[in-house]
Image (cartoon, rainbow, N blue to C red):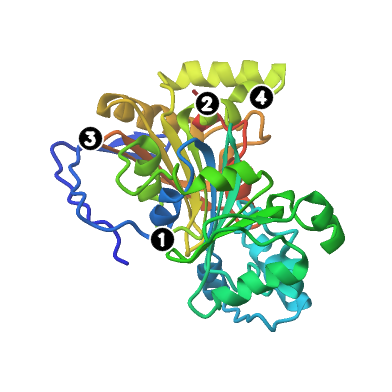
Amino acid sequence: MSLPRRHLIVIGVALLLVAGVAVAWFVTSRDDDGDAGRLGSAVALAPEGSDRLGWTDWAGLRENLGIDLTAASSTTDVEDFLAQGFDADLTSASALVSSAPTLQEEFGWSPATIDWELFAQGEEGAIVLMGLPESLDLDEVESSLADLGYQEPDSEDGFWLGGPDLLARLGNTLSQELAFFTLDRDQRVLAASDDSATLVTWRDEQRGEDLDDPVSAVTEDVEGALSASIYTGDLACVALAITQADDIDRTRAAELIDEAGEVNPLRAFAIAERTDGDVRVAMAFESEEQARTNADTRAVLAAGPAPGQGGSFPDRFHLGDVTADGELVTMDLEPVEGSYVMSDLANGPVLFATC
């Protein structure tokens, strides 16, 4: 599956040096005739009402770490793999980590063998979507669910009924999100949720690949990531807000924002770790003018103190290019050795993601 092609028409470029950081402004046009990548295709399957999306490219992670696992691998090997993934800061977006040993031993699949995972959360519920490799027999997936005690659905697109009592019998490490399953054979996607109603409506309420919105824009920008957290603007302005900090940190943050300049509300936010270990941040705004303004402001904020997080952002990462590209602002972050930039900054308060 090919990645979307992007044609950049540079109308004007202004280079600033803000706290030693290069900030570039671009106006761009993009064609839409390319196919979505792995992340984009997975996000298209998420329910329309999803506010937060957690992506883990399990196949890419195994390749990146040089680890080869199969359905026959031991739980010890799976745990070692997850430990390496944790050390690389690549597992924080997953909902399956604690369940992995039981999944491997009892279900016949786990993060050690599936292609990818997307954990989608919204006001109406949460769902875990899992991309299944061609090597995994779908009949065996369903047979395993039956053997474990899940009640078989009445139709092909129905749901396998488990529930909390069954999960408790299978193992106390299993996530409640694995209480009910449904299998989309055409897409080779296994979906799970703690709410059967979420699975009943899932097929009819997917975002789709043609949705042109800020979430799609930031998703496209971080395509190819091994791990990513993506927020709608409304949730980002709450979950990442500096208002979560204590009084002293909020006061200091307000001073830093006043010094940096104008900030505007986010329309979407993504933070993602790439195969080279660097972290990419993408923020969508209402207009190109807002993006140019916020590229300046947020570059200053990302190069200074980190109230609410403690210390400063340079303690955590070296700030690379900050770019305004149409309505999108992107930041490239090179983590300092021993820091966990992806997992730390996917949750608030994060000053440079303030609204």
Q: Tell me the kind of residue under disc 1.
A: Arg
Q: Tell me the kind of residue under disc 4.
A: Gln
- The residue drawn where x is 62% and y is 19% is 252
Q: Spatial distance from mark 4 to mark 3, Cα to Cα?
A: 35 Å
Q: Which mark is residue 14?
A: 3
Q: Visible in this render: residue 79?
A: no
Q: What residue sits right under mark 1 in the picture?
A: 38
Count every numbered label the image shows and give the total: 4
Q: Which mark is residue 146?
A: none
User: Of callouts 4 and 1, which one flags the residue occurring earlier in the amino acid sequence?
Assistant: 1
| Towards the viewer: 205 or 30 | 205
Where residue 329 appears, as percent x and y from the top left, is: 36, 37
Q: Spatial distance from mark 3 to mark 1, Cα to Cα?
A: 33 Å
Q: Mark 4: few, some, or many residues within 10 Å (few <14, many ≥20)?
A: some
Q: Mark 2: few, some, or many residues within 10 Å (few <14, many ≥20)?
A: many
Q: Foreground mark, 4 or 2?
A: 2
Where residue 312 appears, as percent x and y from the top left, is: 61, 36
| Towards the viewer: 207 or 43 | 207
Q: Quadrant of residue 310?
A: top right
Residue positioned most to the bottom: 72
User: Of callouts 2 and 3, which one flags the residue occurring earlier in the amino acid sequence?
Assistant: 3
Classify 67 as above or below 282. Answer: below
Q: What residue sits right under mark 4 in the picture?
A: 244
